[in-house]
Image (cartoon, grey):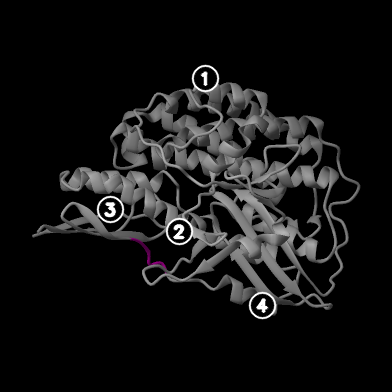
Amino acid sequence: MTHKTITVGGLSRVEGEGALLVRARDGRIEDLELRIYEPPRFFEALLRGRSYTEPPDITARICGICPVAYQMSACQAIEAACGVEVTGPLRDLRLLMYYGEWIESHTLHVYLLHAPDFLGYDSGIAMAADHRDLVQRGLTLKKAGNDLVAAIGGRPIHPVNVRVGGFYRVPSRRELAPVAERLRRAREIALGAVSWVAGFDFPDVEHGYRFLALRHPGEYAILSGDLITSDGRSFDVREWPEHVTEEQVPHSTALHARLDGSPGYLVGPMARYSLNSAQLSPLAREAAAAAGLGPACRNPFRSIVVRAVEIVHACDEASRIIDDLTEPDAPSVPVEPRAATGHGASEAPRGTLYHRYRIDAGGLIHEADIVPPTSQNQARIEADLRNLIEPRLELPKEELAGLCERAIRNHDPCISCSAHFLDLHVDAR
């Protein structure tokens, strides 16, 4: 009888702190745990007792990579509770800022976190030593996204110009003109990125994922929409608590989510693409077809291609919005509090991000619920690891460690903010 324990002490090139433990006996995995050991930060508790105007600023601090996603889901949930919908040019500006975040976040992942796996480097810095021009293009592309967020949000990280109902001030078309020029250059770089990553050597792996994402009737959903699944279900964002539940697992400080009672569904770029690829911009659809993507993608290693296609879409649509933008009459619309519960969801770079707030007539928050993408994906990531590792338990330690890290990075989990080198220990007897 052969026993084997695999311990991954710290994951590298992911946003936060996590580890992996695998116990196997006689070639079969008995236990697999993706351990999120980063301390919880209690943002939901921090929001209770605060004013209904504060979630955009407080929740932006949850993530330095995706603050706009938290702001947009928060604003929409509060506005829904107050019976307000932001439309027209103000919605266009929100979508424009969100595209900036997609560009900078996806570019960071594609060029510096994920591409080194396919090119044989331990880090983006090591890769830059041999591919300086390539990394420089990635940094130029990322800066275009940062500049777009800053032009509307006031600064690229934790924007300060977002408020419930809109913005404190809005940029003029003249202020956005230089950003539009940089976006046109970024779009060309993004098209090159799709061709570049499509040429990587991908393992021949496909999974029968159950996808969840937003769908909007008029656009590739990012800011709002109804929830749809790959097995044909759909529901309004107000019905989220009836379909998605969370539970604590002993090995993780991150909750695990269930969809209609079942664990292991997936949100994020592959889910969005597989459910909504026909709504991509024409240029992005052409890039996807040239890269060999069909209408859906179920190979997690090819998620890097999907992200690159979404960068093209974001650059293309951001340029279009700036060209067509009408300056709003006011930077925001009035939002008066009332006793109610509001729900909001948007598509963060890593997947569907849900917020719920219950406020009283004076505008104080009594309940707050935030469900980030990584908690929804965690059970599915564990399933991917199990499927990948079990047939390969006899591989050398270094090769198995590399496969484990790659499988996790396929989903770009945002645990929090730090990165550490993977330390693998195998105890076989």
Of residues 3 and 73, the one nearer the viewer is: 3
Labels 3 and 4: the sequence-earlier one: 4
Report how many numbered discs are placed on residues in the image. 4
Tag 2 secondary structure: loop
**Viewer-nearest of labels 4 and 1?**
1
Q: Can you see residue 8?
A: no
Screen quadrant of the N terminus: bottom left
Tag 3 secondary structure: loop
Vertical relation: 39 (above or below) 237? below
Q: Can you see residue 212?
A: yes
Give the labeled residue for mark 3. 422
Labels 3 and 2: the sequence-earlier one: 2
Q: Position of residue 195 (x, y in %)?
A: 47, 23
- The answer for how far apart the CA atoms under marks 1 and 3 are is 35 Å
The kind of residue on which mark 2 rests is Ile
CB contact under 8 Å: marks 2 and 4: no
Labels 4 and 1: the sequence-earlier one: 4
Which residue: 52% across, 37% down? 307
Q: Which stretch did the figure color magenta?
A: 33-38
CB contact under 8 Å: marks 1 and 3: no
CB contact under 8 Å: marks 3 and 2: no
Which residue: 76% across, 64% down? 78
- The answer for how far apart the CA atoms under marks 3 and 2 are is 15 Å
Q: Position of residue 115 (x, y in %)?
A: 39, 36
Which residue: 37% across, 27% down? 200
- The answer for how far apart the CA atoms under marks 1 and 2 are is 33 Å
Of residues 288 and 141, the one nearer the viewer is: 288
CB contact under 8 Å: marks 4 and 1: no
Vertical relation: 321 (above or below) 341? above
**Residue 384 part of the magenta segment:** no
Labels 1 and 3: the sequence-earlier one: 1
Find the residue positioned furthest to the right: 329
